[in-house]
Amino acid sequence: MKSLGYYNGTISELEALKVSANDRAFYFGDGVYDAVMCRNNIPYLLDLHIDRLYKNCSILDINPSISKKQLKNIICDLVKKVDAKEKFVYFHISRGSQIRDHAYGDLKGNLFISVTERKTDDYKEKMKCALAKDIRYELCNIKTLNLLPSVLTAQQSKNSNCDEAIMYRNRNFITEGSHSNVSILKGGALVTAPNSKYILPGVTRAHLIEIANQNGIPVEERKYSIKELLSADEIIISSSSKMVRGVSHIDGKTVGGKDEKLLSLFRETIYNNYINATTV
Ligand code: PLP
């Protein structure tokens, strides 16, 4: 198979998959999702992503209807059905299906999974980014299906020939990317916005902090400003699909480029851990 879709036990080519029109994901984006890269049929850091998905279900009172172990087994079986070395595995659990009504009943979650071929980008190539006001609401720590503000912001950056938008709440608070976390390197330290209702606790961001701790690199989890961003030694974009990428330009102006060595340490370690992973 070239791509695969799964919905509550039914498997087919992604485009041919049938889903219930009463699924609350359609009406309200009422659900949570997660995603991993997969290489050699090993969905990378899958347990961490499943843990986050179930935590988000619990925060939003969504009944996942299957156990974490069952979900893991389903994903591990599905990835083998798509012929590609590298794949992207997306999975979401919506609250369930019912006739449209804002308030919900006692529902069982619907599980949707897609597996598609996806090669990792050239992780050494730096990204061009645009600054954008963070127009999201206050549940940014939850990976919900409601992504309209992120979609509009990502499109705005694409329209100005950028690869990602770096968002701010105010001049003193860079939050994250439209679909990534943002950190900076300054004077040999890793500076990253603290986990809060304004950023997603990224798996790759946590991995960056772990690498810093293992290498004696100071970590400052604190708010930082647009000014600090623009004068940072390096700017780091991190996500499960992009891994770790440096940034060369913001709104057309050159940024970073002052600590390639430290940037490389994070970039290579994360990429190598991914390509050398031997277990799920
Ligand atoms: N922040 C946002 C808003 C995201 O959408 C993502 C990934 O999709 C991330 C951060 C990075 O999270 P992770 O490293 O877990 O993929």
Image (cartoon, rainbow, N blue to C red):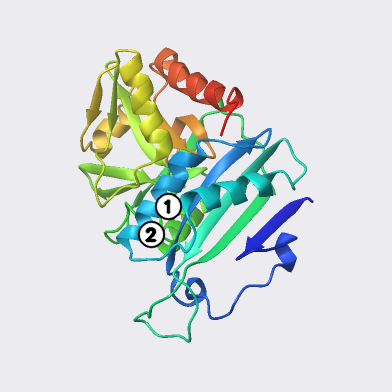
Numbered circle sitting on residue 112 = none
- Image quadrant in which you'd find residue 85: top right
Vertical relation: 226 (above or below) 260 = below
Across and down, in percent, residue 257 comes to 42, 20
- Image quadrant in which you'd find residue 172: top left
Across and down, in percent, residue 225 comes to 23, 38
Which image quarter has ligand 1?
A: top left
Tag 1: amino acid: Leu
Residue at the disc numbered 1:
53
Q: Please report the residue visible at 50 percent of the width from the left and 36 percent of the height from the top.
A: 45
- Image quadrant in which you'd find residue 40: top right
Across and down, in percent, residue 2 comes to 78, 50
Q: Depth check: 86 or 237 in front?
A: 86
Q: How many marks?
A: 2
Q: Is residue 176 something that shows in the picture?
A: yes
Across and down, in percent, residue 99 comes to 48, 87
Residue at the disc numbered 2:
57
Tag 2: amino acid: Cys
The answer to whether residue 151 is left or right of residue 21 is left
Q: Secondary structure at mark 2?
A: helix
The answer to whether residue 56 is left or right of residue 157 is left
Q: CA distance from mark 2 to mark 1?
A: 6 Å
Question: Do tag 2 and tag 1 residues touch (Cβ < 8 Å)?
Answer: yes
